Amino acid sequence: MKLALAGVSHHRAPLELRERVAIDLASAGALAHELADAEPTTEAVVLSTCNRTELYLASEDEPGVEGAADRALLALAGDDAATLGPVAYRLADEAAALHLFRVAAGLDSLVPGEGEILGQVRDAFEAGAAGPLLDQTFRMALHAGRRARVETAIGESPASVPAAAAALAEQVFDGLGGRSVVLVGAGRTSELTARNLRSRGARITVVVNRSLDRAEQLADAFGATAVELDGLGAALAHADVVVSSTSAPGFVLTAPELTASLRSRRGRPVLFVDLAVPRDIDPALASIDGCFVYDVDDLEAVVAASLQGRRAEAVEAERIVAAEAERFRGWQASLSVVPAIASLRARAEEIRAAELARIEARLGHLPEGERDIVDTVTAQIVNKLLHLPTVRMKEAAVTPDGLLYADVVRHLFGLEEDE
Amino acid sequence: MAELLVWPALIAYGEAAFAYAGELRGRGRYGSLGIWGVRIGWLAQTALLVAQAFTADGFPWGTWAGALNLLSWLVVSGYLIWGCKPRYRLVGLAVMPVAVALLGLAWAGGGTGVETTDRGGWVLALHAGLMLAAFACFTVAAAMALLYLVEERRLKRRDATVLRLRLPSLGALDRLATRVAFTGLVLLSAGIAVGLTRLQAGDLDAAMTVTIVIWALYGLTLVLRWEAGVRGRRLAWSLLTGFALVAVVLPLTHFAA
């Protein structure tokens, strides 16, 4: 069987081209079934995310399937097919499988180790029309992706400023469940950070803004209370995390104003996340016991260090993917000897059945139970005799002599005539 | 023959201490080696203690070296309660060197031998066991407090690698240190109560006075933690001060007497 891949990704195709071929999961599933039903393809899975669209096709008709994958991808691009052609990649067999393994492990992603891709690969697989080859290939890819995430820390550190802010909050508190978050300013960045904090269990309790209208809009989205800037002091009294991103020209939260109330917390921690430029939060607040202040530069430095860590972990993840790809190669090679093994076993069974039939007359006087024993014993003898040759043929399948072994077995047992 | 078990225990604890230091370079690489070192060492030391207990006629850890042997086992046992969870594994960074030092001193002082001894009755055994268990708790609490101060400093200084190399969160360290210190205080109270049953007029010495001071310090720390909300850095320093009394002042007064 032949495995073929045609696709485009963020590596070579700009966004304008990627969006031409991007399709949602339902359409990807429908396309996969359509391709699998058309000659010469027999199996198809379509993976489409914001960074890539890839068509995995498999077929018995070896020469035809690569062309079919390519044509299907270009058809998705419509009028842009001529532009898409040069930036698309076409891979086959082991190279295609290795690529899929790397994709599933997040090694081919824009941010190494990003978490979403593994789920997207699984969804595409489940929505597609996988047969024996693609089923095994995708299962092994998902296994490789899971191993890369479990056995390395590639997906652990945050890769964006909002995620870094939320992860820092988790590092300060013992879990974010029920922690109170105050948003100062109702900008897009603070909203993203608030969403990230909420997804980890924190509660957005107050939105403080110069304009009450905008504060109310955001507060409604989070089930919080909206207050104007003069209510900030009271809002901070019970805050665990303060996220600030106003467009004020100077500090909105200053040390002289807040020191007394923060000291009264007796070390109860509070994390200030300052996403504004110019800054909203006086860095002198960090000198108070239990106060932690992070501005945009600090958060970006944390993200940079995290990404560096991910790249370091990617080396280990590549090793895992290579090992899984090797396992795939062994499995695929073993397919080439499967017909010979099947023929050998069929021939042996045929002989056993014929011999039993030949002595039927002599066994006729035996009780049913004893005849069953004879049947079982002869089957066991055949199985034991064939076990080692079967194992050896599968082992040899991954070596260059694999097919030779299969041919020798066919010749020695006269299997050519059967096949 | 059984006394040779001290070597696998010492080697495994030492390996764990080094592995946890290596864990600072990258998560997961050395951490599992560390926790397996702790487990194997703990099993070896447990076997050693069992052999000592079976051989002795009375309480086999009545000498200072024997007490250190038992104390190191209790410290590692306390650590193992949380240390098996990857999130708290790095508490071992502070605990395992202490455990190695305690066991090493115990060996040097002859506290790891297996011989027939008679070191007093069950009251002494109960008293010493409770006191040592309390000190083990204070040691683990101090290790957590130390990690708290390290992690707090990293967060205060906005160390860019604070998420790449993750220690347990400040909240978790604060909560666990409080809980362990409370357990230690309960055990210490029970140990003192058992000791009082043997106390005779005029027996109060410097070591007993320091023990009372330690009890009062931990009691005050925990009262302030729960009633006045004192936590974080102040709690950590208070726990470390208590541990300094346990580790330095108490032995000095005990053996000077």
Image (spheres, coloured by chain):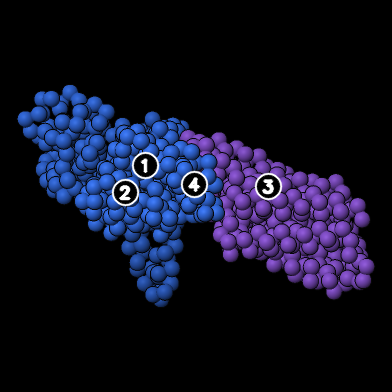
The three-letter amino acid code for the residue at tag 1 is Val
Residue under circle 4?
A259
Q: Chain of mark 3?
A: B
The amino acid type found where label 4 is placed reads Thr
Name the spot of residue A190 as percent of width and height, x first: 31, 44
Chain A representation colour: blue
Q: Secondary structure at mark 3?
A: helix
What residue occupies the far top of the structure in this picture? Answer: A86
Tell me if residue A287 can be seen.
yes
> At numbered mark 2, what does the secondary structure look like: helix, strand or loop?
helix
Q: CA distance from mark 4 to mark 3?
A: 39 Å
Residue with the mark numbered 1: A252
For the residue labelled by badge 1, is the local secondary structure a helix, a strand or a loop? loop
Disc number lying in front (3 or 2): 2
* Amino acid type at image mark 3: Met
Q: How many labels, in total?
A: 4
